């Protein structure tokens, strides 16, 4: 029989071993951890003075007190009175919204009410932006909407394209007789500005934060390619509910990641390092960016800068690249901590991009929407070119502008 002293010694020994095990092997996950704030602050990129001055101009546009994020709503349920003059969307070029205001949605089957449709041209990224932009008009202003431009049909191009990859795409009403009359052509900003003005007037006139009357008196067709990125980021969680990848798409995306991680003896779900997903678009974009924005193609240096941005803030990040030009990526970017995912299906690339803990984007809608579908931080090329204003109004703690070169250039 063991003596009391022997039992006590044995118990203390086992307790000590358990403590050592906890300290050595059960460390918190590093997948989302940033480095200490003082370290991160000391590694901020030093931007040229001209670039900083432009950012100050861009990021200090006038906004309503009532346009703050819904997460920052006042505790007092009574709305603050609006003040004239209003900082209208058409004046600022941004998409503010009245966070304390609720507009009762017009029933989709109320065929007597005006409706809104949207242009459905473009590829996957464009169609996601069009679908989400239209949905936000209903969410914020209660409009009756349909994501098609000429006909109400389940074979509609937008619905057909999105339905292949996402399992929750809906067409609100499939009855053509419910969408009669010629819709007036308008830009997304033009319509948003009209609805914003109407909502503000209704708020002032009724002194109520609940608007019951419809805000539209005319049907409209949005003819351009809406992508209100500041509005999208403010409603990131809502966007997540609009697009749920089909199981097969997500399964293949995870498998593509796992294939890339074999050399690390890890899988997407079993790893001890953060993954930063990277999108590189090249094949058709050089002429497109030059024509639209007078911008040159992103080169190796932008991605190198973005890699360094995360390396200074994350512990042992691994960068996984999806691209329409994997050959260029392997020749210019691939390294021991930068791997290229081989995939020929755009939706699988988008799903893989969304699975990253953080994201590095290029300029296009595909890149932005893929990162938006994720949950982490997003880096975007910094440019002072006034013609490229798609992210000018974005002011989010998860959105970071990274220089595209040593000398900030167009």
Image (cartoon, rainbow, N blue to C red):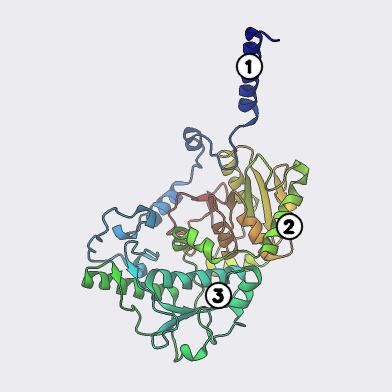
Sooner in the amino-acid sequence: mark 1 or mark 2:
1
Horizontal arrangement in the rendering, residue 83 relative to residue 346 (left or right) = left
Nearest the viewer among 228 and 71 is 71
Nearest the viewer among 117 and 271 is 271
Q: At 60% across and 74% down in the image, what residue appears?
A: 122
**Residue at the spot of label 3:** 170
Q: Which mark is residue 11?
A: 1
Q: Which mark is residue 240?
A: none
Distance, label 1 to label 2, CA atoms, is 58 Å
Residue 91 spot, x, y in % from top left: 34, 68
Is residue 385 visible to the viewer in this orientation of the structure? no
Where 101 falls versus 359 (above or below)? below
Secondary structure found at label 3: loop
Sooner in the amino-acid sequence: mark 3 or mark 1:
1
Where 18 falls versus 239 (above or below)? above
Q: Quadrant of residue 312?
A: top right
Where 284 falls versus 177 (above or below)? above
Sooner in the amino-acid sequence: mark 3 or mark 2:
3
Nearest the viewer among 133 and 239 is 239
Distance, label 3 to label 2, CA atoms, is 34 Å
Residue 57 spot, x, y in % from top left: 38, 55
Q: Quadrant of the C terminus?
A: bottom right
Q: Label 3 neighbourhood size at 10 Å, few (<14), some (14-19), many (20+)?
A: some
Distance, label 3 to label 1, CA atoms, is 63 Å
**Residue at the spot of label 2:** 326
């Amino acid at each position: 029989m063991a003596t009391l002293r022997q039992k006590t010694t044995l118990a203390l020994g086992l307790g000590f071993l358990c403590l050592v095990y906890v300290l050595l092997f059960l460390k918190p996950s590093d997948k989302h951890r940033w480095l200490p704030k003082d370290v991160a602050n000391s590694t901020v990129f030093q931007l040229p003075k001209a670039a900083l001055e432009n950012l100050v101009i861009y990021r200090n546009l006038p906004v309503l007190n009532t346009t703050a994020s819904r997460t920052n709503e006042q505790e007092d349920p009574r709305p603050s009175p609006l003040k004239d003059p209003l900082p209208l969307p058409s004046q600022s070029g941004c998409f503010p919204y009245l966070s304390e205001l609720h507009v009762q949605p017009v029933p989709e089957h109320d065929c007597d009410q005006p409706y809104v449709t949207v242009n459905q041209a473009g590829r996957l990224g464009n169609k996601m932006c069009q679908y989400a932009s239209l949905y936000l008009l209903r969410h914020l202003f209660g409009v009756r909407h349909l994501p098609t431009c000429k006909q109400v049909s389940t074979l509609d191009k937008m619905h057909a394209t999105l339905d292949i990859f996402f399992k929750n795409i809906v067409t609100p009403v499939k009855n053509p007789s419910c969408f009669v009359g010629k819709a007036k052509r308008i830009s997304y900003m033009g319509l948003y500005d009209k609805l914003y003005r109407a909502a503000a007037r209704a708020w002032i006139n009724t002194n109520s934060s609940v608007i019951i009357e419809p805000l539209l008196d005319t049907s409209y067709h949005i003819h351009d390619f809406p992508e209100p990125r500041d509005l999208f980021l403010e409603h990131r969680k809502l966007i997540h509910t609009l697009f749920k990848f089909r199981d097969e798409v997500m399964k293949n995306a995870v498998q593509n990641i796992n294939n890339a991680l074999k050399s690390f003896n890890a899988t997407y779900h079993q790893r001890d390092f953060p993954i930063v997903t990277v999108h590189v678009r090249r094949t058709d974009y050089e002429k497109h960016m030059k024509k639209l924005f007078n911008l040159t193609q992103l080169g190796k240096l932008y991605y190198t800068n973005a890699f360094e941005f995360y390396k200074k803030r994350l512990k042992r990040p691994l960068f996984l690249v999806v691209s329409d030009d994997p050959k260029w990526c392997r020749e210019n970017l691939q390294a021991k901590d930068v791997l290229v995912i081989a995939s020929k299906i755009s939706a699988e690339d988008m799903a893989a991009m969304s699975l990253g803990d953080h994201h590095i984007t290029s300029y296009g809608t595909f890149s932005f929407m893929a990162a938006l579908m994720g949950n982490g931080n997003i880096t975007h090329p910094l440019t002072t070119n006034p013609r490229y204003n798609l992210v000018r109004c974005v002011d989010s703690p998860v959105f970071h502008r990274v220089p595209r070169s040593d000398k900030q250039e167009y």
